[in-house]
Amino acid sequence: MATMKLYELVNHYHIGTELTCAEAMFIACNEYYHLNLSEETRKMFSVMGLGMQTEQSCCGAFTVAVGIIGLMTAKEGQTDVSNMEGYQMIAELTEFMLGFYGTLHCVELQRLEIVDYENPCHAIVEALAKKLEELLANRRIFCPANGGQLSC
């Protein structure tokens, strides 16, 4: 069987399951990027779905994607302000979401009507996964052709 794209893994874990957008994004990224993140880390991200469980906050899948960018771009011993690569990628991801959907706010995203999707969250999480994969591949942070090695 061919290797799945990140968005295909996200859809596998999100559509037709009980997982939130954040959980699906976390599990898919952990598997796709071979991160081997712990159960404790999964639990940390688990409450980020449904707009931090309130629907009044930022999209959970977006928040997880930002965390994955930080994980993959931050350097050991550097302070937050030193991670310009990560900041640039997050700015691009934010611009993508705002340009395409007009908001990062969970409840507003859930109100969208997206053709061919019963649940707008499925389309949004899929699009986020595609954009995240593109951003990381363009920066050569993840190389699927190199056996899934980070920082090639």
Image (cartoon, grey):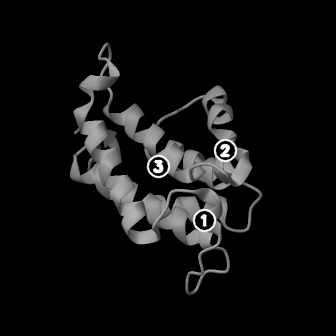
What residue type is disc 1 on? Answer: Glu
Residue in the image at 67% along x and 67% along y:
15
Label 1: which residue? 108
Between disc 3 and disc 2, the foreground one is 2
Q: Which mark is residue 42?
A: none
Query: In the picture, residue 72 is in which quadrant?
Result: top left
Label 3 vs 2, first from the N-terminus: 3
- Helix, strand or loop status at disc 2: helix
Q: Residue furthest bottom?
A: 115
- Helix, strand or loop status at disc 1: helix
Label 3: which residue? 32
- Helix, strand or loop status at disc 3: helix
Whether residues under marks 3 and 2 lie with C-beta atoms below 8 angstroms apart, the answer is: no
What residue type is disc 2 on? Answer: Met
Q: Residue furthest top?
A: 77
Q: Which mark is residue 52?
A: 2
Label 2 vs label 1: CA separation? Answer: 14 Å
Residue in the image at 57% along x and 53% along y:
59
Is 76 on the left-hand or right-hand side of 3? left
Q: Is residue 3 visible?
A: no
Between disc 2 and disc 1, the foreground one is 1
Q: How many marks?
A: 3
At which x and y percent is residue 80? 34, 23
Is 56 on the left-hand or right-hand side of 76? right
Label 3 vs 1, first from the N-terminus: 3
